[in-house]
């Protein structure tokens, strides 16, 4: 079977691409989704307390504002419903092949050849929108296989596992764990939180959106657009502190005041105080994380985990911490995504083989040697300060501009010139060097070579501006 455009993944990226393609008249596309529903990360993450830590007003497509958000920070089920509603409203659901996994994609005689779990497809253009946060990591703790209770990752929440009155161990203190802890603390018998590195936590200042606000947004979309624009610039301005780390000191003071206010015990407070520059790892936002940690049934353990026994997690000092349930809030594989092993370019080598542990792409979107391939949220397009939906939309606009160039000029395939890609990557690396992300902490933004191949070291408006035009001169035509 053949389609002009194949899209991998029906999360924010794949769905956004499908909608925009359809709106602009490219209707010959298929979305391959390995799950049986759409929504990507917002379908997969259903852990208690799961919500967006970016304000709802900027966490939606610019072309589909949602007047029905119930809070200034939308909960997971609302975002998931929003995405499903978008698929229906814009009529792209019929183009999605659910339960269809793309196992391999190779450039083969002028087109992409896709081996999927439902047969072979060919496509002229491939849009990879699998998302960077979908391969959970569970650390290989000695003895984990002997554990008698339930153990699961935050992104694979076991809703059948009983938590009420049980002894729950939570491992990790990243964006997922700090939402899980306050949500389950009230029901858990005991909650032991294993912290390797304390996070910088800012107050979230969440509030419900009042019915009159929802009514107003429903009736006067311009009002919501204005609120969105204001929210956008307010958040966008914070990028300055990420680019000029000294400015972060001000924010650090606010975060420490937040900690002091919530945690009176100096010992616990010391354990929760980070010793690296704020922003180097993702800045977390929460109003209820610290208050949960001071509850009687919670213990914060900072000694490293040595092993797991049938009914306990054991730390290096030999202490047994009894547990009936272990929750891994231990993050995702990001810079060595399995999809990179599955996509093979003109020379038969995979993205992973080209990248050698450090993903690179022209404008974070196209890759030399991989004609007509577009990566959504590809290398160096993640954000530490604003909504990634903005980056996704900028990339989609770029894909549309590229398709227009192909059609107008009657070109079969294009790929970035290696020198253009190298220049782009060098510029990104140079800019990254002065940012807060390069101040020496260990974070998931860094790949196995120590390079930050995850984040965009600049403003989103700068990136959006860049992506409005397809830079034909940076590309070469590929005929086979
Ligand atoms: P994460 O940020 O990678 O955090 C993983 C946590 O697990 C870290 O605290 C890490 O400690 C700890 N850890 C890993 N291996 C460990 C081990 N062997 N022993 C002890 N601790 C260990 O993962 P995440 O919290 O799932 O978040 C990932 C990303 O998803 C976020 O940064 C964010 O971009 C996104 N996210 C977004 C939202 C949202 O609201 N929009 C919500 C959740 C997640 P170290 O810090 O020492 O490595």
Image (cartoon, rainbow, N blue to C red):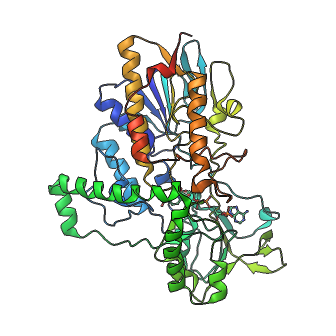
- The residue furthest left is 219
Q: Position of residue 92 (x, y in %)?
A: 34, 36
Q: Image height check: is 28 above or below 389?
A: above
Q: Residue at x 21, y 65 (%)?
A: 213
Q: Position of residue 356 (x, y in %)?
A: 72, 35
Q: Residue at x 41, y 17 (%)?
A: 406
Looking at the image, which is closer to me, 377 or 103? 377
What is the quadrant of residue 424 in the picture? top right
Picture layout, residue 461 above or below residue 237: above
Q: Position of residue 222 (x, y in %)?
A: 18, 52
In this rendering, does residue 149 appear at all?
A: yes
Of residues 129 and 408, the one nearer the viewer is: 408
Locate the C terminus by quadrant.
top right
Is residue 387 depicted above or below 112 in this figure? Answer: below
Give the image location of residue 315, x and y in percent: 79, 74
Within the image, what quadrant is residue 263 found in?
A: bottom right
Which residue is found at the position 29% from the left and 54% from the top? 229
Q: Is residue 271 left or right of residue 480?
A: right
How many numbered callouts?
0
Dividing the image into four quarters, tell me where ligand 1 lies.
bottom right
In terms of depth relative to the viewer, which is nearer, 467 or 224? Answer: 467
Q: Is residue 123 visible?
A: no
């Amino acid at each position: 079977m053949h389609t002009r455009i194949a899209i991998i993944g029906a999360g924010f990226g794949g769905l956004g691409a499908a909608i925009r393609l359809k709106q602009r008249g490219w209707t010959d596309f298929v979305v391959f989704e390995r799950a049986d529903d759409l929504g990507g990360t917002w379908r997969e993450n259903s852990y208690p307390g799961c919500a967006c830590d970016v304000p709802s007003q900027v966490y939606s497509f610019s072309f589909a504002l949602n007047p029905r958000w119930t809070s200034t920070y939308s909960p997971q089920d609302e975002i998931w419903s929003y995405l499903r509603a978008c698929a229906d409203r814009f009529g792209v659901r019929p183009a999605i092949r659910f339960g269809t996994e793309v196992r391999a994609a190779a450039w083969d005689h002028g087109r992409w050849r896709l081996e999927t779990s439902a047969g072979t497809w060919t496509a002229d253009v491939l849009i990879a929108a699998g998302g960077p946060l979908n391969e959970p990591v569970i650390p290989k703790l000695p003895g984990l296989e002997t554990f008698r209770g339930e153990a699961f990752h935050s992104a694979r929440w076991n809703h059948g596992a009983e938590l009420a009155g049980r002894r729950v161990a939570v491992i990790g203190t990243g964006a997922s764990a700090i939402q899980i802890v306050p949500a389950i603390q009230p029901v858990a018998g005991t909650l032991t939180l294993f912290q390797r590195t304390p996070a910088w936590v800012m107050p979230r200042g969440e509030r419900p959106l009042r019915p009159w606000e929802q009514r107003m947004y429903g009736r006067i979309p311009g009002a919501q657009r204005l609120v969105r624009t204001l929210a956008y610039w307010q958040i966008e301005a914070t990028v300055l502190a990420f680019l000029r780390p000294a400015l972060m000191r001000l924010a650090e003071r606010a975060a420490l005041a937040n900690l002091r206010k919530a945690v009176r015990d100096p010992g616990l407070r010391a354990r929760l105080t980070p010793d690296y520059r704020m922003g180097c790892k993702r800045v977390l936002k929460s109003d209820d994380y610290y208050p949960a940690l001071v509850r009687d049934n919670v213990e914060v353990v900072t000694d490293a985990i040595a092993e797991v026994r049938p009914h306990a997690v054991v730390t290096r000092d030999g202490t047994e911490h009894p547990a009936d349930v272990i929750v891994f809030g231990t993050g995702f594989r990001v810079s060595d995504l399995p999809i990179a092993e599955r996509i093979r370019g003109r020379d038969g080598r995979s993205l992973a083989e080209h990248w050698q542990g450090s993903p690179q792409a022209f404008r974070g979107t196209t890759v030399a040697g991989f004609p007509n391939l577009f990566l959504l949220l590809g290398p160096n397009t993640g954000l530490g300060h604003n909504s990634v939906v903005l980056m996704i939309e900028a990339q989609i606009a770029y894909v549309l501009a590229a398709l227009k160039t192909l059609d107008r000029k009657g070109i079969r395939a294009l790929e970035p010139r290696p020198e253009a890609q190298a220049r782009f990557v060098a510029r990104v690396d140079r800019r990254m060097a002065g940012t807060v992300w390069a101040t020496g902490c260990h974070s998931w933004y860094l790949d196995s070579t120590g390079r930050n191949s995850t984040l965009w070291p600049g403003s989103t408006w700068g990136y959006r501006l860049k992506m409005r035009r397809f830079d034909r001169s940076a590309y070469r035509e590929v005929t086979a």
